[in-house]
Image (tube, helix red, strand yellow):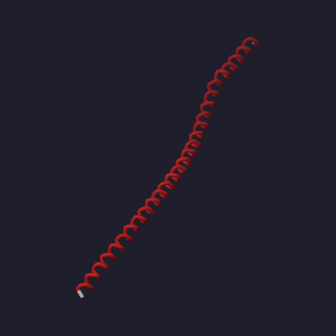
Amino acid sequence: MAKEALLKVVKAEEEADKIVREAREEAKDSIFLAEKQSKTFIEEAVIKAKVECDKLKAKAEDEMKDELESISQKSEKRCKEILDIPQDRFNEAKRLLVERIVK
């Protein structure tokens, strides 16, 4: 009876060792899979971030282009106004001079 009990204990220990080995293998597999999924998730997140960054950059460039165009147009208009004033004065002075000469 003691021999049978001892055999059962040995068999139980072997079974426990087997279960522990299987659990370790499953844990290794789970860790490997989790690392792989994590790496994939990070790669996808980086790609999405780059795409979003490119979109925001393009949008900012378009907005800056529009602003620069607007500033350029305002500047050009102001320059024309500055140049037109002397021409108007010149024309007015010319007209007055012609009137005086004619009188």
User: In the rendered view, would you say 59 is above or below 25?
Assistant: above
Q: Is 5 left, or right, of 76 in this rendering?
A: left
| Position of residue 97 in the picture relative to residue 13 (left or right) | right
Question: Looking at the image, which is closer to me, 58 or 30?
Answer: 30
> Image quadrant of residue 96?
top right
- Residue at the farthest left position: 2
Residue at point 30%, 76% (across, down): 13
Q: Quadrant of the N terminus?
A: bottom left
| Residue most extreme to the top | 101
Relative to the observer, which residue lies in front, 100 or 72?
Answer: 72
Residue 16 in the image, given as x and y percentages of width and height: 32, 75
Quarter of the rendering occupied by the C terminus: top right
Query: On the image, which quarter does residue 84 sit in?
Result: top right
Q: Residue furthest bottom?
A: 1
Answer above or below: position of 10 versus 45.
below
Q: Residue at x 28, y 82 (%)?
A: 7
Identify which residue is drawn at 32% across, 75% down.
Answer: 14
Where is residue 72? Give x, y as percent: 61, 33
- Where does the image place residue 8, in percent across and percent down from the top left? 29, 82
Q: Residue at x 43, y 61 (%)?
A: 32
> From what the image shows, is residue 64 above or below residue 8?
above
In the displayed structure, 51 sits above or below 85; it is: below
